[in-house]
Image (cartoon, rainbow, N blue to C red):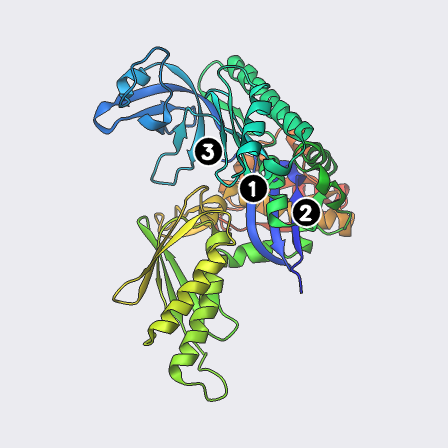
Amino acid sequence: MNALRQVAISGSGGVLRAALLENGRLLEWREENEGQGVLAGDVYRGRIADVLPGISSAFVDIGVGQNAYLYVDDTLPRRGSAPGKANISERVQVGEKVIVQVSKEGTELKAPKVTARISLQGRFLVYLPVEAGVSLSRKITDPAVRQQLSERLSAHLAPEEGVIVRTEAKDAPEDRLREELEYLKKRWCEMIAHADQLKGPGLVTREMALLESIIRDLAAWGVEEVLVEHAPTLQQVKEVMQVLAEEDLNKLGAYQGREPLFAQLGIDAQLQRGLNRQVPLQSGGHLVIDRTEAMTVIDVNTGAFTGKGGQQREQAITVANVEAAVEIAAQLRLRDIGGIIIIDFIDMKEAANKEKVLAVLKRELARDPVPSTVLGMTALGLVEMTRKRVRASLSERLTEPCAACEGRGRVWSVDEMKRRLCSELTSLAKGQEAEAAVIELPRRLYHPLSELGSEQQKLWPVHLFLLEAPALKPDEYRIVYAGRTEEAKRLYGKQE
């Protein structure tokens, strides 16, 4: 039976969110809003804050309170510079203004990494506005096709521009390639115009980036349905699909349900489970996932699993490890875990069984668009692997260190609490026709919500009457009343 793959997109509450599901199971979660930190693909106008020749690097002030890291290989040579090994002091100077793009998101302890080699991703092409030349995917092997693509695209490029031609482009009509290139060039012109208006370092653009990324991946994912909640977001999705995925427009639909889209699909509950340390397996075993600054460690436990029908111990353990390998690949993708990963499978004696488990792990990891490498099993039976870090992990995106326990624990971030509150109020507005709500909030959530302007207030489904409740937990809120505005006013005045 073929798997049903869906993309769910919501722009309600001023926050753009997207989820990829397979047969109802959440595979990937992405979120984008103006309040978020530095994201991969963001373009910034920056200023060189420091140059460190000893490590061939520079630090760039991008206006976010934390300088970004720029390595010499990610800088551009100056015109007329001599060929040879790059020198960071010749490439950039302190105080110089630069346009950079985030290539790797930072963590709570590491700075984001940026590059001056800007690239704008399309479905068929990657546009390089500051690097000349046409490069083609190595998977396009026909010399005649390679020459034809190179000549056609070169005709539409200025001397300082370039493109990387993706594998899919070999079967794309010429007008589709030209339209996509024109779209990407227009986006770059808009970025430069916006950058020129900035008085200092800051974000140049994030608009449409998440939608473009999701829609680029539609064909690769083999998605059968794209559900969109929020009319303006639906129009944005349609506009991007007309350029990047015109043949998939018939899969696009507007979500009309009374319950919020992500609640209806069970996504919120799956996100909660995606943050749990322990992951149950269907057989009765479980995974334990622990993250440190250096690496992620995953332990496989049999739990209540003892095998079925008199299976021998080795066979039973192999079955449990195979199931665990499938689940581990899914959890790494959902949680966006990158870097060094160590997996402690249950001990197996036979080499054939070890190879079987490794083969299943590699097969499942191959379904993940983020590249990973399995290095093998050590003498202690530990599997060593790496997964490329592109975005911050799910935990870093949805939670923040808890101030009450000096960072040893984590609580929902303010942005995630606002999203959950907005979703719950949307359900009340649609299901009970609520007009207003009286809400008790902890101090860390009360202050940002009480300072909302009139335009921001309009993004919420009901009128908010807010009460500060210091006794609540840092990531807890309480809806005291939701219903008519007159009654909400009366209760609010009584409790204030």
Residue 289, compared with residue 143, is above or below; it is: below
Residue 434 lies, in percent from the top left, at: 75, 46
Compare residues 149 and 237 and report the one nearer the observer: 149
Compare residues 298 and 168 and report the one nearer the observer: 168
Instruction: From the image, state whether disc 2 or disc 3 is nearer to you.
Output: 3
Left/right of residue 161 with respect to residue 313 in the rendered view: right
Badge 2 marks a residue whose secondary structure is helix
Residue sitting farthest toward the top: 80
**Residue matched to label 3:** 38
Using the numbered discs, state the Cα–Cα distance from disc 2 to disc 3 in whole angstroms.
29 Å
Left/right of residue 457 with respect to residue 113 in the rendered view: right
Residue 351 lies, in percent from the top left, at: 33, 72
Disc 3 and disc 1 in contact, CB within 8 angstroms: no
Residue 192 lies, in percent from the top left, at: 53, 17
Q: Residue at x 48, y 75 (%)?
A: 284
Q: Residue at x 63, y 44 (%)?
A: 218
First in sequence: mark 1 vs mark 2:
1
Instruction: From the image, state whether disc 1 or disc 2 is nearer to you.
Output: 1
